[in-house]
Amino acid sequence: MANVVEMKGITKVFPGTVANDNVDFTLEKGEIHVLLGENGAGKTTLMNVLYGLYQPEAGEIYINDKKVEIKSPKDAISLGIGMVHQHFMLIHNFTIAENMVLGQEPKKGALSIDMEKAKKDTKELADKYGFNIDPDSVIDDITVGQQQKVEILKALYRGAEILILDEPTAVLTPQEIQDFGIILKNLVKEGKSIILITHKLKEVMSMSDRVTIIRRGKYIDTVKTKDTDIDGLAEMMVGRKVNLIVEKNKPKIGDVILKVENLKALDHRGLPALRGINFELKAGEILGIAGVDGNGQTELIETIVGLRKATEGKVYLKGEDITGKTTREITDAGVGHIPEDRQKRGLVLKYSLLENSILGIHHRAPYSKGIMMNYGKIREHVNNLIKNFDIRTPNEDVNASALSGGNQQKLIVAREIEKDPDMIIAAQPTRGLDVGAIEYIHKRLVAERDNGRAVLLVSLELDEVMALSDRIAVIYDGEIVDILDVKDATEQKLGILMAGGTLHKGEKGGKNNE
C-alpha cells in the first residue's frame, strides 16, 4: 500500500523538553492508524508538526512521496490534511452551516454570503457520510458528539484526504463511540486516510489497522493491530506491565454520608435538568452514576457542591443540610471535588503548581497566617503531593498549563484527597488519560473507599463505573431510574436503563431507588 504521509526523524524541542526525539511515522492510503502513548509522550506535538502548527528542529515530511514544507495550517489544508483537535474550535453562537463555511463562505454577488448554498453544501456533505445534523442548529444547542461531527465535516469541506483526529472519543458516550467507529469506516470507504491519537486501548483494537507507539518523545514500534493485544499495547506504551483489572476488597459500609432528597434544578437554558433525584451514599462505598451524557449528571454534581441552585429538594452531608451553601462552606464541611473539566474547574492554568495545590484550602492553617500566606508550608505541601502522587513536573513553580493532561489530573486528585474529606466526588476522573494514569487514579479512589471515605463516581465510561463501583445508580432524563448492586449489573441491564427502559415488568420506567 502506498504511503500518503511519511515523517522521517522529526525532532521538536520546547524549553526544557524534547517533545519529539527523532520520530518516524508513516500513514498508508485508506488505513486507520493509531498514534498511541502516555499523556505527554509527544503524540499531539508530532501531529501539530504535520498540521503546520509547530516547526520541527529536524526531520523531513513527505506527502504522496513528495517532500514538502508545512509552515502553517493553511499549507497543510492545501496538501489535503485536516485536523480535529481535542478541544473543538467552533463558534458556539453560530449555526452548523455558519461554522462549516467560516473563512470559505460561498458568495452571492460581491459582498453578501450565500447562506442557502452554505446550508445546502452542509446538508449534502452530512448526508454523504451518514451524519444526522441540521445545518440551522446552533452549536450551543447540540451534543458534544454532534459538535465533533461538525468538526470532521469542516475538514472534509476544505478538501481533507488525510484526517488527524486528536482524542476523538474523549468526550463521547458509549453509543456515540459506536457511531464514531461507523463514521471512520465510511470515511475509509470514501478513500480517506485517518490518524487517530488516543489512549483508549479497546478502541485501538476495534477501530485501527496499525498502531505506532511513542514513549517519552521517542519512537518505540509500529505494529499491525491484528498482531497484538491490549496487554501488549499497554506494556509498550508505559514501559512496564500494567494491571488493567481494578482489585477491590469487600466494602466495609459505614454511616450515611450524603443524602439527596427530591432534588430539582434547572440547566443553563432554564429547563428542568434534575426532576426529583433521590439516593444515599455511605462511608466506605463507591456509588457510580451511569448514564448517557446530558441526562443531568453535570447539574447533579454542581447542585451538590454549591455551583448551581436547587429549585426544590435537599442535600444532607452527615445529617447536616448543606442545600444552597457556598462552595467554600461545602468544601469546609468535608467534600472533595474532582471536577469533570480539569482545565475550567479544576485548575487555574496560569497559576503555578504551588498555587494550584491549595485552591479551596488557601484560607486554612497552616497555609494562611492572617492576611499573609505561609509559603514555606505551601511549598512543603505541594512537594509532598508531587512525590506521593507521582506528578511529573520539572518543579513546583511551573504553571499548571505546562503539565500534560494526566499530570494535571493527578495534581487535582492529590489536592482533593489531601483535603481529608468525608466524601469525594469524582466526575469523569480519567477522561483523556492514558492507561498508566488511569491505573493510578483507580487505585487511589479504591484506597480512599477502603479508608472509609464515601466516593461518588460520575463517569461516561461504563467499564470504569462497573469496575470501581459497589452500587450503580442509573440517571435518565434527570431522574435516578434504578440503583443496582454491582454484582447484579451487566452492560445489557445498564444499557436498557440508560436508554430509559426498565428492568421491572409491567412498568414503563423504573424508579427503584432503594
Image: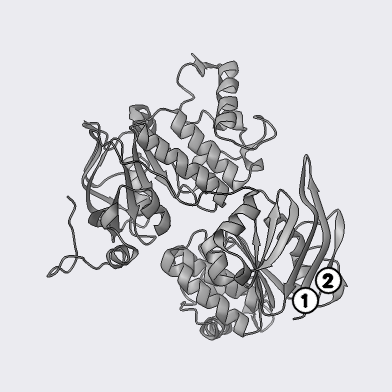
- Label placed on residue 3: 1
Relative to 133, 505 lies left or right: left
Q: Is residue 315 above or below residue 74?
A: above
Q: Rounded to the nearest whole Å, what is the CA distance between mark 1 and mark 2?
A: 9 Å
Q: Secondary structure at mark 2?
A: strand
Q: Position of residue 13 (x, y in %)?
A: 80, 48
Q: Position of residue 315 (x, y in %)?
A: 25, 39
Q: Is residue 240 above or below residue 32?
A: above
Q: Which dot, 1 or 2, sits closer to the camera?
A: 1
Give the residue pinned by disc 2: 62
Can the viewer see residue 235 in this picture?
yes
Q: Position of residue 231 (x, y in %)?
A: 56, 57
Residue farthest along the top direction in this orientation:
369
The structure residue drawn at horizontal position 57% and vertical position 52%, both measured from the top left corner, is: 434
Count the numbered circles shown.
2
Can the viewer see residue 138 in this picture?
no
Question: What colour scheme does the image use?
Answer: one colour
Q: Amino acid at mark 1?
A: Asn
